[in-house]
Image: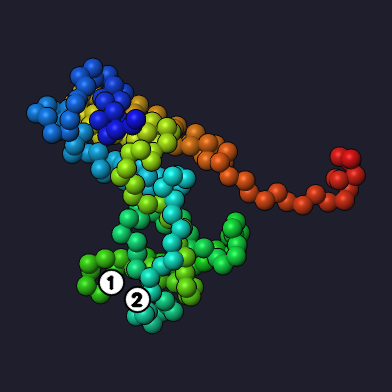
Amino acid sequence: MASVIEICNRALSNIGNSRSINSLNEASKEAGQCSLHFDACRDAALADFDWNFATKRVALADTNAPPPDWQFAYQYPTDCVRIAEIMPTGIRYPTAAQRIEYVVGSNEDLTGNLIYTDQPKAWLKYVARVTDVNMYDAIFMEALSWRLAAAINMALTGSADLGNNALTMYNRVILSAGSHSQNESQEPQPPVDEFTAARLS
């Protein structure tokens, strides 16, 4: 079963550190660095891709207090790390022309964000902050281990080359996540015209 400690130890291994940790609270430099950077690296890695395990669809809460330039102002979900889209009603795979316009801004008290749009009864598709490690898929854990490795590297090794390598590996894993994600969904195929159908028959 995956754990935060396992991901941290993989990150340490990625930069050539053979000292593993058993707890984020132990008195070691490795544990201190992992504890310092883990949450931020997790959120950054989540925000860099539309991870299937972290993608949510929710009906937004209307504040009923829109600004003059938008028809609606909705509460920004507290667990959102990146918005994918406001979902057009009845359309699963919107074209660029069908995408719904929106903008994110702060509320009047500067205590939270709002989503401004002209879409009534809006539904939001977004990547959520997932803290339950058991929800992570293998590719995300690999990506997070490299992202964390890049963050803790300088304090532990002082080698810029190792940090750059970790970021390169992180970006490669993110690219591979795209292919993996496509295998877990099926978009509609364009209709075959009569001429092509005749050739294939």
Work out which residue is located at the far left of the displayed protein and give it.
27
Quadrant into which the N terminus falls: top left
Q: Position of residue 73 (x, y in %)?
A: 38, 74
Residue corresponding to mark 2: 63
Q: Position of residue 194 (x, y in %)?
A: 87, 51
Q: Is residue 145 above or below residue 71?
A: above
**First-in-chain label (1 vs 2):** 2
Residue at 38 percent across and 31 percent down: it is: 142
CA separation in Å, label 1 and label 2:
10 Å
Q: Is residue 79 above or below residue 73?
A: above
Q: Which mark's residue is nearer the viewer, 1 or 2?
A: 2
Residue at 44 percent across and 50 percent down: it is: 55
Work out which residue is located at the far bottom of the displayed protein and give it.
68
Q: Amino acid at mark 2?
A: Thr
Q: Quadrant of residue 46?
A: top left
How packed mark 1 is, by other alpha carbons closer than 10 Å (few <14, some 14-19, many 20 or more), is some
